[in-house]
Amino acid sequence: MTTTPIPSHESSHYAGLLVLEQNPERADFTGVPPEPLSVAAATALAGHLAKDLDTILNGIDHLGLILPGALYDQTEILRPGFPLIGALAELYGSSDRERRFKPGLIALGSDHGYFPVAAINPLRRPGSGPLLLLPFCFVGPHDDIAQLAHIMEDTLLQNGTASPATQEAIQQAFGLSTRNLSYATVSDLCALLQVQLDGNELLPLWELLEQAWFQRPGVRHVTLNSGNRFLVADDHAHTLFYTFNDWAQFGPGRSLPTGELGKGYQHWARSQRQYALALDAYGLHVRWVLANPRLEETLAIVDDETALAEFRAIPCLSGDYLVEGIFQNDSEKPERYLSITDQATSELGTLAYTVTTLDANGQLLRLEHHYPLRPQGLNVIIDRLIQRCEEQGAERQVLHPGQLLYSESGRNLRAATAADLPASTERLH
């Protein structure tokens, strides 16, 4: 490559991706992606990619190119500010002690199975899916990179099929069976995800993600048809959590007929889980705030910036679960019996546990609803209830009505009775 030194602060960068679509007949999508390549293997593979890109983009000798010998899922690439891409560009710049840009090819490998630089170390999470990505980043003068970016956006997706030599090298290096191997830009990956989300009626989720990824100024505020509310600013997402009682009495379900409350809350809970998990997976910090009537009224009339300030003024929910206390007897008598209603549906599983405790005389001591806030919260609730019974020497019974049980007059969750049980009861374990 020719050498044209340019101060590093005057250079720019633009990224692309080698997209590996695994063969569904031979791939195990539940497993973890392969570990990073050794230095020698990464260097050999980089030569194949550079040759492909030189052909597809009509010459890249005047530019720098850096790539890791590793595979990532799209949630590792599409994160606020695209930190992995930025880290690659920074590593290219730091490779020259003179801090002056020089064209070259840098392949990052590791003989230890991981990179020492946290920003580019792949997470290798189980179930990463059929698409795995190998990112690469061009570095060069601003004008050259601007011209390259235009060519990449116009060319890669249409004409970016990897050469047979690169396909063979990828399969040998990572031990994967691929059905398709092609080059794309990060914008192409974003557009593909947008189409997928739109096709699944999740376009508001795309709007929230786009706000954070591209670090748009201001606040992106969406309210779903099911009443879920999300505000994104910078790399934080703010959202309201409603217990069933709050949702039905002053929240999004307040205007629904009592007969529709069960399905309505399930719809809200499904969307809440879906959006919160996706936002977290794509690198946003999801901040949960417990809804209250005053906040509900305020958010209905204020602008987005004021709404964000209202969210930030309230301490966020911490921990893996929430206990909603409904009744507590002032008696200090120990609990001798716990009746636990599993408020669950076949689609969503457990949404809450309703816990009723009695003393030795059958006197009601407490009525509580325990809500998991995160996937691991369910097991935490179970463990704590078992420990609570053991510490107080209390018996326990878990009732499984197979649906949400609520009082139509009070619009609140209620404990199960024998008449509510289509299935046998069993102990919590």
Image: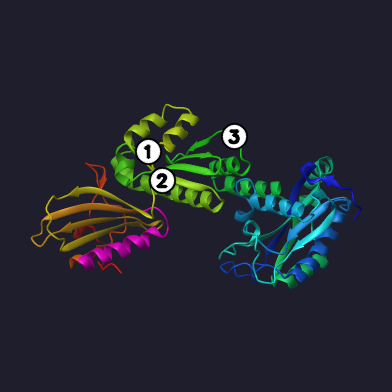
What's the amino acid at mark 1?
Answer: Pro
The answer, for residue 416, to whether it is visible in the render is no
Specify which label sits upstream in the sequence, 2 or 1. Answer: 1
Q: Which residue is mark 3?
A: 217
Q: Quote the CA–CA distance across marks 3 and 1.
A: 29 Å
Which corner quadrant of the image does residue 28 belong to?
bottom right
**Horizontal side of residue 87 vs 30, given as left or right:** right
Residue 26: % across, % down: 65, 72
Residue 70 against residue 208 in the figure, above or below: below
From what the image shows, is residue 230 above or below residue 156?
above
At x 63%, y 56%, the residue is: 119
Is 307 on the left or on the right of 200, as rendered?
Answer: left
Judge left or right: residue 396 versus residue 203: left
Say whether residue 421 is magenta: no
Viewer-side label of 2, 3: 3
Is 29 drawn above or below residue 159 in the view shown? Answer: below
Residue drawn at point x = 16 percent, y = 61 percent:
335
Q: Tell me the kind of residue under disc 2.
A: Trp
Kindly state the secondary structure of the residue where label 3 is placed: loop
In primary-sequence order, the first of circles 3 and 1 is 3
Q: Which residue is mark 2?
A: 268
**Start-end of magenta stretch:** 372-391
Instruction: Point out which mark residue 252 bears.
Output: 1
Q: Which quarter of the rendered picture does the C terminus lie within?
A: bottom left
Q: Are marks 2 and 1 in contact (CB under 8 Å)?
A: yes
Question: Is residue 387 covered in magenta?
Answer: yes
Q: Residue at x 18, y 58 (%)?
A: 357
Callout 2: few (<14), some (14-19), or many (20+) C-alpha neighbours within 10 Å? many
State the residue at coordinates (41%, 60%).
376
Query: 407 or 306: nearer the eye?
Result: 306
Judged by its main secondary structure, the magenta piece is helix
